[in-house]
Each structure stands twice: as structure tokens, then as C-alpha cells.
Amino acid sequence: MFTRIRGFLYRHKRKFVIGGILIGGAVLASQYAQKKLREWQERETKEFLEQTRRRHHFESTERTCNQTILSLTPTVREAVIKFLDTEDLVIRLRSSPTDKVSLWEELKILAFTRASVLVYAEAMLVVTLRIQLNLIGGYMYQDSTSEAEGHGTRALHISSELQHNYLSFCHHFVNDGIRELCALVEEKVRLIVEGTSLKQKLNLQDTEQLFWAIQAAVTGDISDPIKCLNQYFLPPDRLAAADCDTLQKMVSETTDLLESDEIISLTSSCVSQGFSLMVDRISDYYGPAADRTALNMNAGPSGLQNKTQMSNSGLECSNGLTNFIHPNNVAMPMAKLIPIVNGLVQHHTGHGAGPDPWIQQLILDDKLKLLGANVYEAFCNK
């Protein structure tokens, strides 16, 4: 029996060797494939968890950014009203002074300046905060990832104090930057609006052209705030005094971003949208009734008539029929337009007021959201 088995093995030796090699190779290949599969699954799971964690952190950063914008907006508006106060002029006009015309002329300048400054200030604030908070968010995510992986030397350690010092540059904008912005815009407004008589009638297109002319004049100035965002937000004396290398690095990177053509173009687009929205709001007061209804200066500091008195200003009833009249076909004297423009800044002031349509539009703007996402992603992987 043993001889027969040995003979069988001898005769089929080559088959057994080849078969053993094939089976062994298959086992090894299977084990290798299983190992690579496990590694791929672990890598995919880790990447998915990291993407999920990064997405949640970015969404949290975006919520913080929106909340910060909403909390600072009333402060910006109050600063604009403080530097360009019109209440005293309105009170003096109510008393029928002898210099009534000169007071109206000054109110005209201040009203258009306030409205224009508000558009610029809030657009500049939102763009800068998007950059700052997403830059911090990206660094904080990188910081937490480095610590979790045990690479503490790579972490920047973005402390609460560092965050406070970095974001405190916005206070420079509110305290000093807006003052500079008011002076610049008022100078341009005087050039554009001063020659318009109080009796001159303006339709909606004429009003729109005034705002476009103001924007063009500001853009053409060497101190154009959109091209000089650093000048309004980042005070040179505080930058020189910064003793933290990380803070200096963050400020340097912020400066590069604010000076980039992409940010300049985006901010300019936001300002244009702001003026368009302002003209849309003014259009609510244009209608056939507006041309024959006197604005009541006793209605309040803004000088605005109660909007309900003009709610049907775009409609005129005749013989039981309602005929629509386009606002562009209605003209309004400059003297009646001034209280309306002046009142645009008074609305939504105070920390108890809700967000105005302009801020809501900026918060929801897709281009600004994309800007925040790009900044965050760039500094997550830096």
C-alpha cells in the first residue's frame, strides 16, 4: 500500500508542486487583498469622518460669522448716525427758521451721505468678517487636527486671547474707519448732489443715477475704501505693536486677501447691490400720490410720512377702475425725496431691531458664502 501511494505521489509530483504553489499563492493573495480592503475601508471611513467633522466645524463657523455680523450691524449704524447726525437739523426745520433753505441744503448732503456710507460700511464689514472668521476657523481646525494626531509642534494654538486681539481690529473700523469713510463720501456727495435744486423733480431713474454717480466718484478716488480695506480695518500702530508671531502671520495673510483683486471685485459688486436695494426701497414712495402729498416734518426725526399714507401711491382710482402707473413715470421734488433718503438709515437701528433687508441679502449672498468656504478650506490645509 505504501509503495503504491509513494508511486502515485512520484508520478504526480509536478502536479502537486504546481497545485501547492497555486493554492499557497491564492491564500497569500486573498490575505493581501483582505488587508488592502481593510486599509481602504479604514482610510475611507477616516476620510468620511474627517470630512463630516470639517463640514460641521465649517457650518459652526458660518453660524458664528452670521451672528457676529448681526451683532455688529447695529453698532455700525449707530456710528453712522453719530458721525452724520441729522436730528438737530430736522428739529430746527420744524421751528420755521429764517435760514430754512440752507438747512435743507445741508440736510440734503447729510441724507445722501448717510445712505451711501451705510451701504459701503456694511458691505466692507461683512466681507472682512467673512475672511477673518473663516481664517480663524481654518486655523482652529488645523490646530485641533494636529493635536489629535499627536503633532503638537504643528499646531498654532489659537487661544481665546489671540482670537480677541485679531477680531478687535473691527473696533478700529467702527471707531475710526467709519469716521474716515464718512468724510470721504460726504466730499463726493457734495460734488454730486449740491447742484441739484430742492425744487428739481426727480423720477426713480434720476434718483438711481445720483447714487451711481456717488459710487463712481468714490471709486475714482485714490482713497477708495474698497481698494483700501486694510486702511479702514487694520490700524498700523497696533500691527507694529503685535508681539505674537501667530497674530502677525494672521494679519499678514488677511492683508494679502483684502488687497487681492478678487476681494476688491466682490466688495464692489456688493456695494452695487446695496445701492440697487436702496433704490428699490425708495421706489416704494414713488407714485402719483407722492407728487401731491406734502411730507410731514413732524412725523419724527427721519421726516418720513407714515408709509401707510402712501401705500396706494402706485395706484389711481378713476370711475371705479384701478390704473397702474409705473414709478418711473412719477417725479418727486428733491425736497420731498430728502426725508425719505434720510429715513432709510433710521430704520432698523438699535440692538432690539431685526436685521434689515440689506444685511440679510449680504448674509445669504452665494458669492460671499463661497468666499468664506474657500478661505476656510485654504487655511484648513495650510
Image (spheres, rainbow, N blue to C red):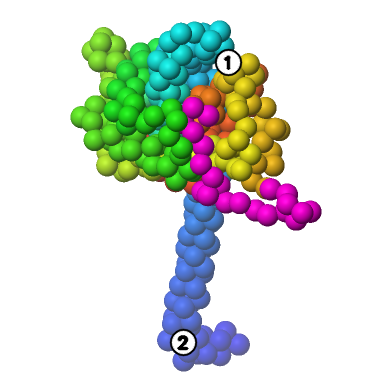
Can you tell which of label 1 and label 2 is closer to the viewer? 1
Q: Which image quadrant is residue 135 in?
A: top left
162 over 262 or under it: above or below? above
The residue identified by callout 2 is 15
Q: Residue furthest right?
A: 320
Residue at left offset 51%, top offset 48%: 328
Q: Which residues are drawn in magenta?
A: 316-336
Q: Residues within 10 Å of mark 2 (few under 14, many from 20)?
A: few
Q: Name the residue nearer the viewer: 228 or 120.
A: 120
**Callout 2, which amino acid?**
Lys
Residue 199 at x, y percent in the picture: 45, 30
Residue 324 among those drawn in magenta: yes
Q: Which image quadrant is residue 159 in?
A: top left
**Callout 1, which amino acid?**
Pro
Q: Quadrant of the N terminus?
A: bottom right
Q: Quadrant of the C terminus?
A: top left
Residue 97 at x, y percent in the picture: 49, 8
Residue at left offset 27%, top offset 38%: 260
Secondary structure under the numbered disc 2 in the rendered image: helix
236 over 45 or under it: above or below? above
Residue 40 vs residue 247: left or right?
right
Q: Residues within 10 Å of mark 1 (few under 14, many from 20)?
A: some
3D distance between C-alphas at marks 1 and 2: 104 Å
Residue 263 at x, y percent in the picture: 33, 39
120 over 97 or under it: above or below? below
Residue 310 vs residue 213: left or right?
right
Residue 60 at x, y percent in the picture: 56, 33
Residue at left offset 46%, top offset 8%: 98
Q: Name the residue nearer the viewer: 164 or 335.
A: 335
Q: Name the residue nearer the viewer: 70 or 329.
A: 329
The residue identified by callout 1 is 301
